Image (tube, grey):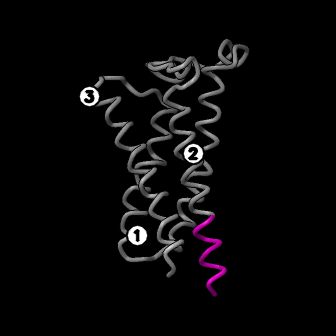
Amino acid sequence: MNKKSENTFFIAWAASLIATAGSLYFSEIVGYEPCELCWYQRILMYPMVIVLGIAYIRKDFKAAAYSVALSSIGILISLYHYSIQKIPFLTESAPACGRIPCTGQYINWFGFVTIPLLALVAFIIILIMSLITLRNIKEEK
């Protein structure tokens, strides 16, 4: 494997690790209780730390295909979650989703950065780096 594949794959893994650490920080240290949509995003993000980490150690960069699938679904959920927080007509018609409302905003840095946006950015980074890794693998053949 070339160094470029290794670097892009590492960035995907690092993004999943940072997102997972941030998620755990918000819930376990700060005490923010996750809503239902946050849980779905966690279900998609947390395994990527392990899967991509093991694949990186074993130099099995074809595992990027798994992160493409997980991050693509994560992007859709995060985008929806962010939309119901920030687009007024969606916020007003958003369904109740458990004990903690999904429209709630524990953080709102700079007036637009919320937890679902942070997850969305992480999923996008993982998707892009995984696609680049897969392209590099294909070019090497």
| Magenta stretch prevailing secondary structure | helix
Residue 63: x and y in percent read 50, 70
Height in image: 7 above or below 110? below
Residue at left offset 62%, top offset 65%: 132
Residue marked by disc 3: 29
Residues rendered magenta in the picture: 132-141
Magenta run includes residue 136: yes
Q: Which mark is drawn over residue 74?
A: 2
Amino acid on which the number 3 mark rests in the picture: Ile
Foreground: disc 3 or disc 2: 3
Pointer 3 local density, CA inside 10 Å: few below 14, some 14–19, many at least 20: few
Residue marked by disc 1: 56
In the image as oriented, which residue stretches furthest toward the left? 29
Q: Nearer the viewer, residue 96 or 65?
A: 65
Amino acid on which the number 2 mark rests in the picture: Gly
In the image as oriented, which residue stretches furthest toward the front? 3
Q: Are marks 1 and 2 in contact (CB under 8 Å)?
A: no
Residue at left offset 40%, top offset 69%: 56
